[in-house]
Amino acid sequence: MRYLMELSVSDLFTRTVNAFPTTQRRQHITDTVSVQDIELAPAESALIAKAKVRGTEGDEYDCVIEFQEVEYSPSENENSTTFPVNGKEYTIVPINRHNARAKVGCNCLDFSFRFSYHDNTHKALHGDKPYLYTRVPGSNRPPANPTQSPGMCKHVISLADELADAGIIQ
């Protein structure tokens, strides 16, 4: 089945929480990861935020959030935020985490096995179409994502939190 939906960062977070309501990990341990080297890349009506995120075990992961429908150069009476890229200053209306469509990605195993395929079916994946994770035949492990929900790993959640702290999203 192919979905024609596109989701916001808020939608992805809510679906992550709802898909795994009893977890003590992911959204509950975002303080154990460290967002480093955030790079912002302005594009026409979009903003791509990439970062290296150091995980709980010290491994680094490449994370990305691509926001669509970004409003550059707002009028003087509009709420705005600025950020520098390669010596040039950009001004945008802060991105509404509830309304702006977003695409996310991370190269960690949690994101790859649980969310990337389902994010892709909802047009919320930044990157190439992944394969659908299937369990090894005879495995007694539960399905990776039994509700087939799109979502985010703790690294992408932390990147979104950092962007909110910087005033890029609200």
Image (spheres, grey):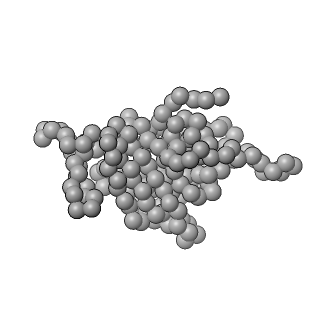
Please give left or right for residue 33 compared with residue 71 in the image.
right
Residue 100 in view (yes/no): yes
Please name the residue shown 34% across and 37% down the image.
Answer: 69
Please give left or right for residue 35 compared with residue 69 in the image.
right
Question: What is the x, y in percent for residue 70?
Answer: 31, 40
Please give left or right for residue 87 compared with residue 103 in the image.
left
Please name the residue shown 81% across and 51% down the image.
Answer: 136
Question: What is the x, y in percent for residue 166?
Answer: 30, 55
Q: Nearer the viewer, residue 131 or 79?
A: 131
Please name the residue shown 55% across and 52% down the image.
Answer: 153
Q: Residue furthest right?
A: 138
Question: What is the x, y in percent for residue 35?
Answer: 43, 63
Residue 115 in view (yes/no): no
Q: Residue furthest bottom?
A: 58
- The quarter in which the C terminus is drawn is top left
- The quarter in which the N terminus is drawn is top right
Please name the residue shown 69% across and 40% down the image.
Answer: 146
The relative height of residue 168 versus residue 15 in the rendered view (above or below) is below
